[in-house]
Image (cartoon, rainbow, N blue to C red):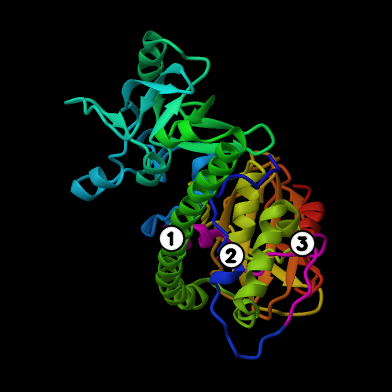
Amino acid sequence: MRIFLGIFIFTLIPHGLLAQDTTQHYTLQFSSSNIKVLSDAYLHYGSNFNDIYSMFRYDSTLFNERYNDTCYIKTTLRKEFHNTIREGELGDYYYSMEYGFLDAKITKVKLKNEKFWALDIGKRKYKENEEVYQFDSFTDRIFSVLIFPNMQSKNDLKEFLNKYEIGDHRIYYDALTNTFELELKTRNNFVRKTFFPFYPKMEEMNDVEIADMNYEKFKEYAIELSKKEDKFNRDHIKDLVRVKRDQQKIYDKRWKNFQKLYMSEEEKRMSQEDWMKYYQLIIQDEFRAVMNSEPKKGLFDRYLMEMGYRLSEMDLVNPNTNLSLKSEQGFVLIDELILINLSKMYYAHALNSIANNFQLNFTSGDRYALLIKTKTGEYGIITTTIPENKELVELEFKSISKDLVSIEMISKKAGL
């Protein structure tokens, strides 16, 4: 199994949330081809910073976006679409908006010697113990009586009132045809109905005067709706700025501890912005980044496990053996030794007894790889098959500078 990407849950803090830092930093040039892992800090980033957003849940969706999204009733997110509904009074209040059937009175009006059935949305008939939908106050003030040409019976209007559960509405006007449309936002879609408003003074007006009045009425409605939108968005942005400020305070404190605990010295010299670029490149192709990297203990363990090797729980110590490891360049003290059984797909960390002598329990006939790291930071790799009835006494390795070594190189040399 070679694919690393996808096993982490991670959140990227946008650049705008990162604190401004006047300290002089190294500016590192990364590309997806040369990126390598400098420490295991990237593995801990998500678990240290993801919850900052869940601690400060805030919906940044603006007024008009909310109208166009059926997940919202007016500007409130529907309960069934909110995955972290809070318990208690505040949560119940915040998500209490419900759909309702239109609350209006059916009436009959007379205009130009014709009678029309109409809805008087300014005269509400409240239904006890039922959720009802009410228009915005400026809507029913500007368009209090609506005549629907295609619904000209009392039964048509009754059916209309009881057909749609409504969460919001808009009114549109076409000045070329002098027609209005009422758009109703339902649970899953939007429904439009053509109408024209009724005002008693229309009786004394001609068609041009009525068209002019209709335009002025719609203009008044559009201005009121714009005011409502502007107020919502201004208040919303103020709240969002406050939330981001609080998020940033927590982020900055955690960042300092995160640097101290997990980052290499090279990473600590990066700015937050540079480190996030480095992090994103690792996440984009983690396998390549790991293969480019120095085979440090924790990282190489992770690579072995991803390749299917298991950490051995066997007792690797054999007091009756004494294997000496030495460098071709002379005596160098060994700091770490990873013993890898290539035949049975397990690995273990071996302890150095004294002067590079190891008491190890080998299995005859199995093939092994030994990854060596010296006290001076150099590496060595030895591969060998354990002969039958013959004890290993000494193995020699060639030292490789840590600047030249990578997990990919070690993997190829060891035959992993």
Residue range corresponding to the magenta coloring: 27-51
Q: Badge 3: few (under 14), some or many (20 or more) residues near its Cα, within 10 Å? A: many
Q: Determine whether, in the image, residue 30 is placed left or right of residue 234.
A: right
Where does the image place residue 403, in percent across and percent down from the top left? Answer: 78, 74
Check the image and report above or below for 338 versus 129.
Answer: below
CA distance for labels 1 and 3:
53 Å
What residue is at 38 percent from the left and 37 percent from the top? 78
Residue at 45%, 69% (x, y): give it. 241
Q: Is residue 406 left or right of 95 when viewed as pictured?
A: right
Residue 150, how many percent across, how many down? 52, 15
Q: Is residue 234 magenta?
A: no
Q: Name the residue under label 1.
A: 231
User: At 47% from the left edge and 14% from the top edge, which residue is drawn?
Assistant: 151
Check disc 2 and give the amino acid type.
Pro
At label 3, the amino acid type is Asn
Tag 1 or tag 2, which sits nearer the N-term?
2
Q: In which quarter of the image is the N terminus?
A: top right
Task: Give the amino acid type for the residue marked by disc 1 in the picture.
Answer: Lys
| Residue receiving disc 2 | 14
CA gap between label 3 and label 2 equals 27 Å
